[in-house]
Image (spheres, grey):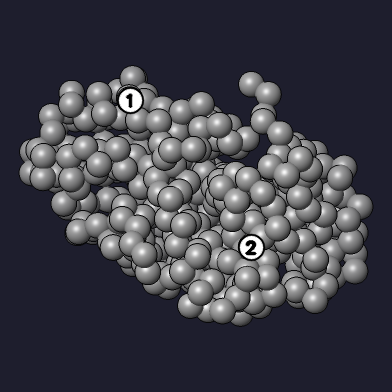
Amino acid sequence: MTPRPAPGGQRLPVAVLGATGAVGQTFVRLLAAHPWFRLAEVAASERSAGKPYAQATAWLDPSPMPAAAAALPVTACDPAVVAAPIVFSALDSGVAGDVELAFARAGRLVLSNAKNHRMAPDVPLVVPDVNADHQHLLAHQRAVRGWTGALVTNSNCAAAVIAMALKPLHDAFGLRQLFVTTLQAVSGAGYPGVPSLDILGNVIPWIADEEPKIEAELPKLLGTLGSTGIEGAGVAVSAQVTRVPVEHGHTACLAAAFTGRPTAEEALEVLAAWRGAAGVRDLPSAPASPLVLAAATDRPQPRRDVMAGGGMSVVVGRVRPDPVLDLRLVAMGHNVVVGAAGASVLNAEWLLANGVVPGVAA
């Protein structure tokens, strides 16, 4: 399918903050030939500033570094230096908070992967197919904060996979209670990430801050938009997280209780019919289907399924009755694509298509 022309008739210049890291590199790959956006600037730490991107970056992706990015000079993460109206932030949470606010105050649309602002009442926390409409909260955000810019956050990468799998079931049957155990890929720890002697042949049953992030973010993701904030879904969430020796792909084993008490057959019917949030399917980065149902009893598997929908789909399998709650199921998605950079790009596409980017008509 040929992507529809960019709103406004021309590709908008965009910048990537934290462009030399693992998620930043995924942004660069996704944006280098994007039909609506033109990768114009890359920014990183002071030790990288002034170098060509190819020299400053230890490229991790199996595909070659895009030629359009290789020669770009790396600049500082400063709105006085970076001019693009749309800024994708792959910054570490240790520095992201103040830097992202500075760009929003300077009138930029900031799409953040960091945890710093996710739970702020006036900041949309968005997985596009789950709750793209929450981005309408930006009008309130601008009024309250007195800025012309905007700040939208991605969810935690595991929470994104879980929310994608549960959104259609929540809408149909009313999710009440969730127990989740995650098996999270090493790429979720960034680069160089987890030492090889810690992870090879091993499972690590702890990831810093991960369990409270999942437990807090899921109710906001599944909540409803109000005029001044998000009313969280009344869902009780208990999360246990593990790091496993898998390169890409977070797996979540879910046991859930619903007000509507669905059977496995009813749940499968709802999951198969779901097409995600309105207005997302025709955007350039959207997969044909946000959910892919795995028929085989031993799927999903990261090695075989992680690139479903180009890494933008979540694969769901093993939907079955639960002897304590109502349903058990397994969900898996690419943590760096649908759980991070790809979701941010899709958020930006939705915002541009809906006329939210300053000075650009829908």
**Residue drawn at 71 percent across, 39 percent down:** 6
Q: Which residue is mark 1?
A: 273
**CB contact under 8 Å: marks 1 and 2:** no
Q: Which residue is mark 2?
A: 109
Where residue 203 appears, as percent x and y from the top left, is 40, 52
Q: Nearer the viewer, residue 274 or 58?
A: 274
Disc 2 is placed on an element classified as strand
Q: Amino acid at mark 2?
A: Leu
Please give left or right for residue 293 compared with residue 169 in the image.
Answer: right
First-in-chain label (1 vs 2): 2
Please give left or right for residue 102 compared with residue 52 in the image.
Answer: left
Q: Determine crowd level at label 1: few under 14, some 14-19, many 20+ residues with C-alpha closer than 10 A.
A: few
Q: Quadrant of residue 294?
A: top left
Q: Is residue 329 visible?
A: yes
**Residue drawn at 76 percent across, 67 percent down:** 44
CA distance separating discs 1 and 2:
33 Å
Count of marks, rendered view = 2
In the picture, the quarter occupied by the C terminus is top right
Q: Quadrant of residue 57?
A: bottom right
